Image: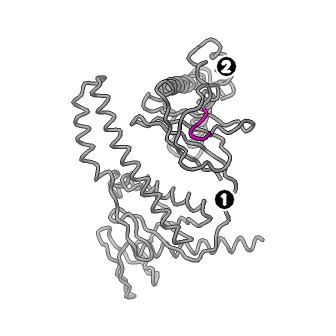
Amino acid sequence: MIRTFRYPLYPTESQAATLVAWIEASRQLYNAALQERRDAWDKNRVSISRFDQGQSLTEIRDFDPVYRAVPSVVSDEVLQRVDRSFQAFFGRCARGSKPGFPRFKSASGYESIGFRQDARKPSRVREGGIAIPKLGAVEANIYRPVRGTPFEFRIRRVPSGRWFVSVSCDVGEAPAKVPVRKAVGVDLGLKSFMVTSDGRAVENPKYFVAGEEVLARRQQKLVRKRRGSNGHVKAKLLVAKAYERVANQRLDHSRKLAAELYSEFDLVAYEDLDIRGLKEHGKASEKSINDAAWGQFLRCLTSKAENAGKWAVPVDPRGTSQRCSQCGAMVTKTLAERVHRCACGFIADRDHNAALNVLALGTSAVRLAEAEKAVSR
């Protein structure tokens, strides 16, 4: 099981300047490696591998001081990133989905560097800091212990100017699934963020809407500043901090809500929503869907479940709002109809009825999986 631990990083001014230079050199290397692959194919129909580019990089480092200043493990990770982008492109082509050819990175679109942990050497996580190649110890707030064996580090500068280090660790096998004693189904929405099968409704916090006024004022000030001036830099930083605050609020909400659910339930069933499809087909405002951050919440839900040995069960969302959870009859409703009324006499909030259906589908899926597992033994 792989887990990533993220910590605030506090480099000195000289260390921060070095990291900024490494990020820019890595961006240029990424773009150069991408251009080389494109030109080799367009002109000669030749594919260049990561191994080929690694050999070329070794030669470049011998005479170019810019690339020689960057740790080799960091430069190797850049070439791996380029290779992964092409592998993902070929995979999308094979699946018949929209290919999305790898693109060049702008200065604002490349803000991190990574490097591997050599298993034969001591961990780079130290008390109060991180040991970075060619830079030494950099102060970090290790506010919770790193679990497992670290194997990769990623240093990122966020738009607000803050630095973070992410430590990816192998924490061993996931705990065995606990017996299901208490289960719940959840229906995600925009009116209420979540309605559970036991009738609880969680209000949609709408963090972006709440902070929109502050963001609008800061953006207005930004457009009035002369580009490149100190005032423009400061105004741009304030806009970035407003966006960062909203992102942090969403993540905090998702994590706490997921932890709260698993403190009470052993199984959480949820709709396996096609969030991108909902945006593309105009089922709801893209802005509202982004603000709800359903995808982030579901990632937190599955991560918490895996850590705790509990169940996060996705179910097919089709028909959950239309089908009666008591008798199974289909009761057609428009999106404007918020109350479920069935001929069998069952009346409930539309989302509560959907959550009951989600719970039934989720528990059935787990029983089926456990039965198949028992037969296979």
The amino acid type, in three-letter code, at marker 2 is: Thr
Residue 128 among those drawn in magenta: yes
Q: Earlier in the sequence, mark 2 or mark 1?
A: 2
Would residue 206 be counted in the magenta stretch?
no
Viewer-proximal residue, 358 or 94? 358
Query: What is the magenta range?
Result: 126-131
Residue 169 shows in the view: yes
Q: Could you tell me if residue 104 is visible in this image?
A: no
**Which residue extends farthest top?**
63
In front of the other: 312 or 52? 312
User: At numbered mark 2, what does the secondary structure look like: helix, strand or loop?
Assistant: helix
Give the dominant element type of the magenta stretch: helix, strand or loop.
Answer: strand
Q: Tell me the SS state at disc 1.
A: loop
Q: Which residue is mark 1?
A: 174
**Residue wearing tag 2:** 58
- The structure residue drawn at horizontal position 76% and vertical position 70%, both measured from the top left corner, is 376
Residue 218 disc label: none
How far is the residue under mark 2 from the one under mark 1? 40 Å
Question: Which mark lies nearer to you, 2 or 1?
Answer: 1
Q: Nearer the viewer, residue 76 or 281?
A: 76
Point 66% across, 41% down: residue = 151
Q: Amino acid at mark 1?
A: Ala
Residue 235 in the image, given as x and y percentages of width and height: 28, 33
Residue 329 in picture, x, y percent from top left: 44, 81
Q: Classify 194 as above or below 48.
A: below
Q: In the image shown, does 49 or 13 lie closer to the viewer?
A: 13
In the picture provided, is 367 more to the left or to the right than 165?
right
Pointer 1: residues within 10 angstroms few (<14), some, or many (20+)?
A: few
Left/right placement of residue 143 relative to residue 196 reads right
